[in-house]
Image (cartoon, grey):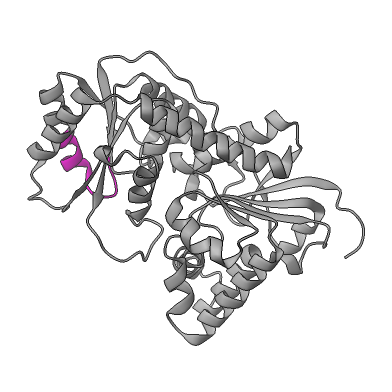
Amino acid sequence: MRGRPARDLAVVCAENLRGYNAGMLSVDRAAVSYFKALGRTFDLCLMDGPRKTGKLRYRNIESPAQLAEYRSVVYWGDFQINPMWGRVDVTGRLLRRKRVGSAEEAIAYYVERYLDIGRFIPESSSVHAVGQCMLGAGPALEEGPAPIRLALQEGMTAFWRRARQVIVRDPVSFAWAHPQAPGVVVQGVDCAFLQLALRAAKQDYFIFDFGRCLGREQGAALAEAVAGRTGLRAIPIRWLGGSSRWRVPGSHFNRMARLISGARFALTDIYHLCVNALVRRTPPFCLSRRGGEIRSTLSDAKKEALFAMLGTDALHRFIDPGPDEPLDGIARWVAETHASLDPEGLWATCDEQARRMRSALDEAFA
């Protein structure tokens, strides 16, 4: 391909189904705040998904050849270059929507748009992946039917060969990815740490939401038990949608962000709610399922990796989800840990991780 592309940055975001996932919205808002602060021109892009979420506008990329219009292609946040995401999420979505007739066709779609993008863009254009989680990538490349394995392996090899910079979001991802491309892969944090976030004076309440380990009713019962032990008011939020408030995603997100900022702590089992609490100087108490192989982007291993990276395992607890889980024991853990918590070291670690992330990004884009 000849000639210099006319557009600056294509910031390729992960699909936010119906715009109802606040965590993914926070990741995309972080892209806007970061690149605007640099004075760079950019398009938020989606391979598939809504053209609008709140005030954010996206360009739908119907063919990977459209990315040839950009001087840099940036896969922003989540699992986009993780072959597990291609095998599970992308393949499942395309088959459900009857966009493809087989898993092999779905993998070809994924590889073209996320891994082998170098075939479609000029040599002068750079490829980046930022805030990526690579948990489960190894097994996704090594298991399953041979045609799918081979397509993913070839795509991954093509990506490492073409990428100029890959910033992964946790040490476990780094341990797997760095040997694949030592001069390309660096460790950062989740993109949501780059948000411009309100930090408010703390008031006598905590916020909660559940949707991964505990159901709504069990989560509400736990919040009631925690309120009884702490004397704080429990305020529910709806982080993952399912509420009429999500008809206006931007306003609903801003309302939740204000509540998170003023809370004494957050109680949840949702990864990005934890990240958004940390950004707003609100300690998150997080629940995860015990053990298990990493077979999905919803694996609780990403929460374990986050808290281990920040050196704050005291805020993370493994449980055996089910009707017999002793909620009072969890409530006691929250109350006692909160009473003795001195979070200043945690905030310093968060700030340092975000600073390192910005520094790595600035090397490429500033």
Residue occupying the point 55% across, 27% down: 196
Determine the image quadrant of residue 355.
top right
**Is 211 within the magenta?**
yes
Is residue 53 shown to the viewer in this render? no
Determine the image quadrant of residue 289.
bottom left
Residue 170: x percent and y percent?
46, 50
Residue 349 falls left or right of residue 293: right
Q: Is residue 284 above or below residue 138?
A: above
- Quadrant position of the N terminus in the picture: bottom right
Residue 171 falls left or right of residue 73: left
Residue occupying the point 40% across, 32% down: 278
Residue 102: x percent and y percent?
51, 79
Q: How many marks?
A: 0
Determine the residue located farthest toward the right in the rendered image: 3
Is residue 181 shown to the viewer in this render? yes
**Is 106 within the magenta?**
no
Residue 72: x percent and y percent?
75, 51
Q: In this view, does 264 lie above or below 309?
A: above
Residue 324: x percent and y percent?
7, 50
Residue 216 falls left or right of residue 6: left
Residue occupying the point 47% across, 70% down: 87
Residue 199 vs residue 97, the one in the foreground: 199
Magenta-colored span: 210-222
